[in-house]
């Protein structure tokens, strides 16, 4: 979740780091250009056409805490409506952006 200044917060109301690794975890965003590239490589992705960004929040161990899906207009989408392998792959990509190697350690490198 984000406060009025755009800072993420954890479930206890504490402010999380916008990006990068912090004591309470880390956040990473997949932007519209990255989503378009992903969709072109995965035609049966099942993601909504109006999806413009995905924000992923991970705890300090790398476990996924929250997904913030937004439309082009900034409206929130319920990611459970399009949960599946494409969303899992995007969460791993988001995790790799901030913490290279961590997703590979947990999930196995792609192509293995």
Image (cartoon, rainbow, N blue to C red):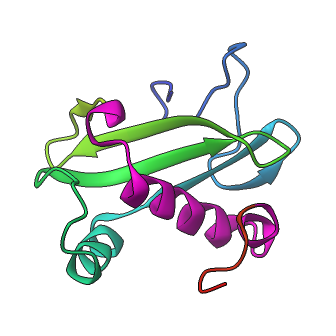
Residue 7 in view: no
Q: Which residues are magenta?
A: 79-106
Quarter of the image containing the C terminus? bottom right
Residue 62 in view: yes
Q: Is residue 15 left or right of residue 111?
A: right
Main secondary structure along the magenta-highlighted residues? helix
**Closer to us: 110 or 27:** 110
**Closer to us: 101 or 14:** 101
Vertical arrangement, residue 79 with respect to residue 37, above or below: above
- Place residue 7 in its image quadrant: top right
Residue depicted at x 62% and y 71%? 97
- Place residue 73 in its image quadrant: top left
Residue depicted at x 21% and y 55%? 46
* Residue 49, image x, y percentages: 10, 55
Q: Is residue 29 left or right of residue 65?
A: left
Instruction: Name the residue furthest top.
Output: 12
* Residue 71, image x, y percentages: 19, 44
Vertical arrangement, residue 106 with respect to residue 84, above or below: below
**Closer to us: 48 or 55:** 48
* Residue 82, image x, y percentages: 28, 42
**Closer to us: 39 or 23:** 39
Q: Is residue 105 covered in magenta?
A: yes
How many labels sit on residues? Answer: 0
Q: Is residue 1 covered in magenta?
A: no
Residue depicted at x 61% and y 42%? 57
* Residue 39, image x, y percentages: 24, 72
Instruction: Name the residue furthest front.
Output: 112
Q: Is residue 60 left or right of residue 15?
A: right
Vertical arrangement, residue 3 with respect to residue 84, above or below: above
């Amino acid at each position: 979740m984000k406060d009025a200044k755009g800072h993420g917060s954890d479930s206890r109301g504490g402010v999380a780091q916008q990006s990068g690794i912090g004591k309470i975890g880390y956040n990473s965003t997949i932007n519209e250009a990255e989503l378009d590239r992903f969709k072109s490589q995965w035609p049966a992705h099942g993601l909504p056409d109006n999806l413009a960004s995905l924000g992923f929040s991970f705890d300090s161990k790398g476990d996924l805490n929250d997904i913030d899906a937004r439309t082009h207009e900034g409206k929130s989408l319920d990611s459970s409506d399009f949960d599946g392998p494409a969303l899992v792959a995007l969460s791993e990509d988001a995790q790799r952006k901030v913490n290279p190697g961590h997703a590979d350690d947990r999930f196995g490198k792609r192509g293995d």
